[in-house]
Amino acid sequence: MKIPEPYFSRLFKPFVFALALMPLVSLGLAAWQDKLGANPIEVITHSTGDWTLRFLLITLSISTLRRLINWGQLIRLRRMLGLYAFFYATLHLFTYLWLDQFFWWEDILADIIKRPFITVGMLAFVLLIPLAATSTNAMIRRLGKNWLKLHKLIYPITILGVLHFWWLVKADVREPFIYMAILALLLAERVWNAWRFKKQFLK
Ligand code: HEM
């Protein structure tokens, strides 16, 4: 599968960029129309958290999808989608720091230590920072092979993201279970692909 070059970079990529912005646009619209319900902070926290995890999984699914449907161009969307994960994670974190905790650092620190799901979420966010910081072409060139190694952090980050969600829901784990199942499938496909490649190579 292949979209002709000018259409891919001038139409398809900007379309995906705009689409990825929609969760924020719809949140902004709902806030503007006063439709966020009785607990707007909770709605914003949940929506930005959900989209962080979704974009992490979407980013991970690019390589799998590229192999499954043989669409090499998809890889050119991966960096943008990964940066969207970081963007929504930053909004999620700032909703917590600002709207939820009013930048009361003592309380925030106590919360990070006391509540395991916050500890895990914070760890996932901290690990995302070097990935976002090294996403430029210059950094990719400068880090060479180490860039690939560093960006493997996406795996523990996504696992921590799922764990964070799993830990915070009190009873109904259906939603985090779905995310975990998707992650497990994506990881299994990678293991299978590596095994297939090795077998072919050793033949
Ligand atoms: C990569 C990092 C992160 C991911 C993927 C993530 C994902 C999520 C998800 C999926 C939810 C649940 C949304 C729902 O119920 O629909 C959530 C909720 C939440 N997250 Fe995160 N999160 C991350 C980082 C953080 C950080 C750094 C903090 C704060 C330090 C944080 C604080 C919270 C809070 C307070 C909630 C709501 C808990 C509740 O409803 O009781 N998250 N997050």
Image (cartoon, helix red, strand yellow):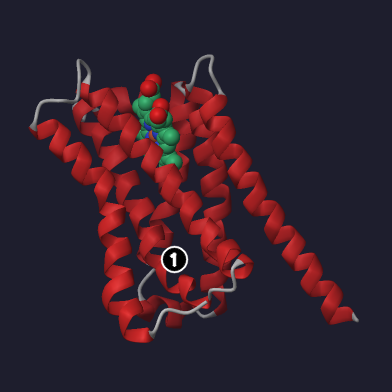
Q: Measuring from the top left, give residue 19's x and y in whole percent.
A: 29, 55
Q: Position of residue 126 (x, y in %)?
A: 42, 48
SS for callout 1? helix
* Picture quadrant of residue 12: bottom left
Please tell me which residue is depicted at 73% across the width and 65% down the height of the picture. Answer: 193
- Is residue 101 visible in the rendered image? The answer is no
Instruction: Judge from the rendering whether residue 67 lies leftward or rightward of residue 169; answer left or right.
Output: right
25 displayed left or right of 167: left
Residue 94 seen in render: yes
Residue 107 shown left or right of residue 53 in the figure: left
Classify 10 Å Cα crowding around label 1: few (below 14), some (14-19), many (20 and above).
Answer: some
Q: Which residue is mark 1?
A: 78
Residue, x 52% and y 55% (percent of image)?
A: 154
Taking the image as shown, residue 181 lies to the left or right of residue 20, namely right
Q: Is residue 89 above or below residue 194?
A: above
In the picture as drawn, the residue positioned furthest to the bottom comes out as: 5
Instruction: Please name the residue shown 44% across and 83% down the image.
Output: 141
- Indicate the quadrant of ligand 1 in the picture: top left
Which residue is more in the foreground, 39 or 3?
A: 3
Q: Residue at x 39, y 44 (%)?
A: 52
Q: Position of residue 124 (x, y in %)?
A: 47, 44
Corner quadrant of residue 112: top left
Disc 1 residue lies near ligand 1 with CB under 8 A: no
In the picture, the quarter occupied by the C terminus is bottom right
Q: Nearer the viewer, residue 193 or 155?
A: 193
Q: Amino acid at mark 1?
A: Arg
Vertically, is 134 above or below 48?
below
Find residue 146 and report its horizontal and vertical position in percent: 55, 73
